[in-house]
Amino acid sequence: MARGVESVRRTLLGVLGALVLVVGVALLVLPGPGLLLVFAGVVLLARAVPALDRFVAPVRVRAMRAAEESVSSGWRIAGSVLVGVFLVAAGVVWGLVPGLPYSGWATGASLIVSGLVLFTLLVWSRRRVQAARGDESDAAD
């Protein structure tokens, strides 16, 4: 019985990891947190398939570097906030205006969720960078 439960767990982790990985790869070229989602997908896949564990560390390093670079200057933060506002506004428009291609709340909701995820990751990245700078200044004292 325990073996069957483990098999189901690994299958679900694998499917979820593959889905998150595919969305992350798509978001590498679309607006959104692509590299962080690629990292999350690789972590989930590595839990399902231990042989993939060797890919976690390199992807993590790149994802964290990208997160830090996204908040490295005021201009980048302002640009990210503008993109997030645009995504949320576009989601509302796509949900309300029936004449647009692929109009409806399914498209609108995905745009709104993308904007909210962007804001969440922006705040997380900023806090992470500030905490790292606080640790560096404590070490320098």
Image: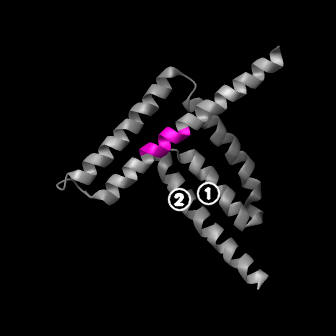
Amino acid carrying mark 1 in the image? Gly
Q: Is residue 86 left or right of residue 75?
A: left
**Quadrant of res 103:** bottom left
Identify the residue at image location x=37%, y=36%: 85
> Would residue 31 be visible to someone looking at this image?
no
Q: Nearer the viewer, mark 1 or mark 2?
A: 1
Nearest to N terminus: mark 1 or mark 2? 2
Residue placed at 65% from the left, 35% from the top?
A: 65
Q: Answer with left or right where residue 128 lies relative to residue 103.
A: right
- Near-viewer residue (140 or 69): 140
Of all residues shown, which one is farthest toward the bottom? 1
Left-right relation of 125 to 75? right
Q: Determine whether label 1 and label 2 are within 8 Å by CB.
A: yes
Residue 108 image point, x, y percent = 32, 53
Give the residue drawn at x 58%, y 25%. Answer: 72
Q: Residue furthest left?
A: 99
Quadrant in which the N terminus is drawn: bottom right
User: Which residue lies under the disc numbered 2?
Assistant: 22
Q: x and y percent of residue 139 in the render?
A: 82, 20
From what the image shows, is residue 51 above or below residue 123? below
Give the Cα distance between marks 1 and 2: 8 Å
Residue 132 percent across, percent down from the top left:
71, 28
Mark 1 lies on residue: 41
User: What stretch of residues is rendered in magenta?
Assistant: 115-121
The crowding category of the residue bearing disc 2, from other C-alpha atoms within 10 Å (few below 14, some 14 to 19, many at least 20), is: some
* Quadrant holding the C terminus: top right
